[in-house]
Image: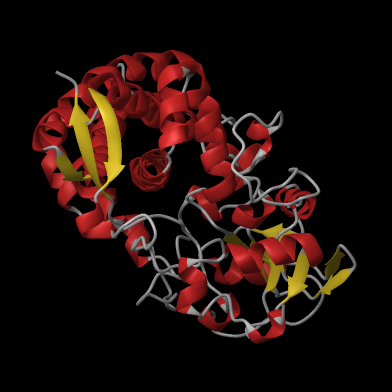
Amino acid sequence: MDIDSLDYFSDPLLALDPYGLLDYLAANKPVYLEPHHGVVMVTGYEEVLTVLRSPDTYSSATVVAGTDPMGLLPERPTGDDIHEFVEQYREYLPQNDQIISADPPVHTAQRALLMGLITPKRLKENEEFIWRLTDRQLDPVLAQGTAEVIAEYAQPYTLLIIADLLGVPEEDHATLLAKPSPMQKMPGTEGHAAKSSPHGNNTLEVFYDYFTEKITERRANPRPDVLGGLAAATFPDGTAPAPIDAARIVSNLFAAGQETTVRLLGTALRRIAEEPDTQARLRANRDQIPRFIEETLRTEGPIKGEFRLAVKTTELAGVPIKAGTPVMLLNGAANRDSRQFECPAEFRPERENVRRHIAFGHGVHTCPGAPLARSETRVTIERLFDRTTDIRVNEAVHGPATDRRYKYMRTYMFRGLHSLTLDFTVRD
């Protein structure tokens, strides 16, 4: 494969079907300095973990800043250690006020605050709501016999679940659902590039006023929900976050928790509808559904990759990396690394290490909403199996099995279907 001729970041065909290139890189060049933009692409499993475990060398400041993050700043850095330079100009970078772009010690404090709120007890209580809501949302979908499940089911479903977990009142659901998805304006998404601004490009700002108001209300009138917990929470040093800082944390949980789960649901349901044997096996063996979800995440997770910035001159797997170099961690490739997963391109839910994937990140960078996404997907599949005898891809929309047509998100960062129309045979 002539990989130097392929531009992963600009070729729309690679955005739609990246796995031929990514599998090749993971197998042959797990750390690769691509020639078109000067980005170091990290596709090897162990190499990705090395970067994730080294925040002093690889900063998260540019996590969604695109292929030329230094071009967003008033000047470009020089030298072999640019940590102070990045801190000086961090405000110019997109999502600069979010936990995903923070480095220690700020990231450590924010994550401690967040993880104290998403507790097993609270998730268990939320799952009871998930079972009830799933049926409520499936009622109109199944009544039609045919439905576009992304817009008609997955998007409102995931919003209502995270809203319940947070404690957002029902009368506000429609207002929040009407707001544009922040993920649609991320760099790497068709029609959107990172932009320079002295205040960055913070796509979650659409939620800040709302959640600031709710945090302020909870401080005056405490309630036993996540918003109430966040309003009362303190950082490890005992200080309380300002309402706007708490609102930024909860905005990330609210928005990101929806988008990744929507894409996971779409991918999982597409495979179930496409593969009658898989569907039959899962219907007969419900205990295999969790492993099916894990293998879906491994082979085609909702996040293809995210950026880091080398703030120190270093090397990785023998590849020299100059300070200031953009580094892209391709989780979607690392999860298909043959050094970690036998026959990685094959869908094998029974593989022993099926949960070793890093579709939701790793360590302190693990997505805090991962257990919720797994629950939503599992319960949806369970209730669909309970209420139907067959689930099929709608051929009028997507074409026959020999010539399927799917519209995927045109982005090098995320993986997911724009739409998915399915046919259901409902039980009598």
Instruction: Where is residue 223? Give x, y as percent.
Output: 27, 18
User: Is 212 left, or right, of 377 in this rendering?
Assistant: left
User: Is 98 left, or right, of 403 in this rendering?
Assistant: right
Residue with the most extreme right position: 318
Instruction: Where is residue 40? Give x, y as percent.
Output: 71, 71
Q: In this view, does 89 lie above or below 179?
A: below
Q: How many labels does the image show?
A: 0
User: Is 89 left, or right, of 121 in this rendering?
Assistant: right
Residue 374 appears in view: yes
Q: Quadrant of residue 389?
A: top left
Instruction: Where is residue 150? Give x, y as percent.
Output: 26, 47
Q: Quadrant of residue 37?
A: bottom right
Instruction: Where is residue 355? Give x, y as percent.
Output: 64, 32
Residue at coordinates 24% horizontally, 25% vertically from top-left?
A: 388
Quarter holding the C terminus is top left
Q: Is residue 9 above or below residue 47?
A: below
Q: In this view, does 223 lie above or below 17?
A: above
Residue 246 appears in view: no
The foreground one among 383 and 190 is 383
The foreground one among 120 and 188 is 188
- Looking at the picture, the colour scheme in use is secondary structure
Residue at coordinates 20% horizontally, 57% vertically from top-left?
A: 396
User: Is 194 left, or right, of 346 in this rendering?
Assistant: left
Residue at coordinates 28% horizontally, 58% vertically from top-left?
A: 398
Quarter holding the N terminus is bottom right
